[in-house]
Amino acid sequence: MTKEWSVGIFLFDEVEVLDFAGPFEVFSVTVDDHGQQPFCVHTISEKGGQIQARNGLRVLSDFDMKHAPPLDILIVPGGYGTRDIESNEQMIKWIKAQSEKVELVVSVCTGSFLLAKAGLLNGKSATTHWESAERMGLQFPNLTVKTGVKFVDEGSVITAAGISAGIDMSFHLVKRLLGAEIARKTAKEMEYDINL
């Protein structure tokens, strides 16, 4: 039987919808060779309950930060709301604490700023939305900002560029954990064109 990974997607007000919904879809529809779902996906927000994503989409998170289940993979999406979180010490500490427990920490878009703020990208290469790349380099000179790429895999930390790049990164992660064939089957199920 394939190992089951517990995936936590961090939600907050003004989170970019496709940043979290894209990875949610990829991991939720993945099925292994035994017909099992290897990923159990949870949504987590600071206080639990409802958050309001970009453009007014309302989403109910499964858990608050204090009651989140043990995770193997933490996904930190981006969006305008990340600017408020950068100055929220409690949330940054939670991301840092999770990074010490999980196998993988992953960001999409400007979620990379939160990983950088938590000290997870020091000395590493990372990417973010192209519009924020210059700001990231200025704000965090201790990391190398890569542009023109969909994602940067640094082993235990993966950063994806803007919005739809989170889907490409998610397929990369499925391929890394379960192999190219399962990743291809998942992409076909979603009718998503990707070279794996």
Image (cartoon, rainbow, N blue to C red):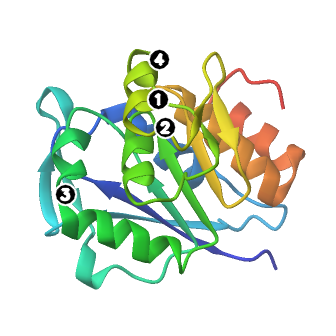
Q: Are marks 2 and 1 in contact (CB under 8 Å)?
A: yes
Circle 2: is it few (<14), some (14-19), or many (20+) Cα within 10 Å? few
Image point (50%, 25%), residue name: 164
Please tell me which of labels 4 and 2 falls first in the chain.
4
Circle 4: is it few (<14), some (14-19), or many (20+) Cα within 10 Å? some
Please tell me which of labels 1 and 4 falls first in the chain.
4
In the rendered view, tell whether residue 39 sits above or below residue 15: below
Label 1 amino acid?
Gly
The residue that label 1 is drawn on is 137
Q: Quadrant of residue 147?
A: top right
Camera-near label (4 vs 2) is 2
* Numbered tag placed on residue 183 in the rendering: none
The residue that label 4 is drawn on is 130
Camera-side residue: 128 or 6?
128
Give how far across and how far down residue 161 sits, in percent.
Answer: 53, 28
Please tell me which of labels 4 and 3 falls first in the chain.
3
Camera-side residue: 119 or 59?
119
